[in-house]
Amino acid sequence: MEYSEQLLSAIARAHPAVLCEIEARDSVFRADFDAEKRRNLLPYARLGRPEFQQEDFDLWVRLAQGELSESAAIEGITNLMEQYYGRPYPLR
């Protein structure tokens, strides 16, 4: 399915626990950087991920269609965040 910001927003609103966990994990990643690096790198959860946009969207769609559990979607998105930030998730 082609990326749609409206559909992504609707799916995220339907799964607030997933959205909250992704935002929390994004904060953990960003806290691991110094202040200068944080200023120069957009948060993943706030459109800082154009190179991962379609993959991220596909995970949300699969969640909405019941193909993924919430925990599997969170892990998949965390894997994308690890690529975006260039390091493993600090709390694994």
Image (cartoon, helix red, strand yellow):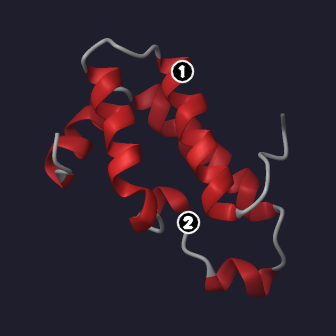
Quadrant of the snapshot with the N terminus: top left
User: In the picture shown, does residue 15 fall above or below 19?
Assistant: above
Under tag 1, what secondary structure? helix
In this picture, residue 20 sits left or right of residue 40? left
Pinpoint residue 17: horizontal percent, then vertical percent.
Answer: 48, 27
Pinpoint residue 77: horizontal percent, then vertical percent.
Answer: 53, 40
- Which amino acid type corresponds to the residue marked 1 in the rendered image? Ala
User: In the picture shown, does residue 83 fall above or below 12?
Assistant: below
19 and 79: which one is in front? 79
Q: Which residue is mark 2?
A: 43
Q: Which residue is mark 1?
A: 72
The residue shown at (37%, 56%) is: 53
The residue shown at (32%, 37%) is: 58
> Which tag, 2 or 1, sits closer to the chain's start?
2
The residue shown at (39%, 33%) is: 59
- Which amino acid type corresponds to the residue marked 2 in the rendered image? Pro
Q: Callout 2: few (<14), some (14-19), or many (20+) C-alpha neighbours within 10 Å?
A: some
Under tag 2, what secondary structure? loop
Report the Cα–Cα distance between label 2 and label 1.
21 Å
In this picture, residue 79 sits left or right of residue 73? right
Which of discs 2 and 1 lies nearer the camera? The answer is 1
Pinpoint residue 19: horizontal percent, then vertical percent.
Answer: 46, 38
Pinpoint residue 45: horizontal percent, then vertical percent.
Answer: 48, 56
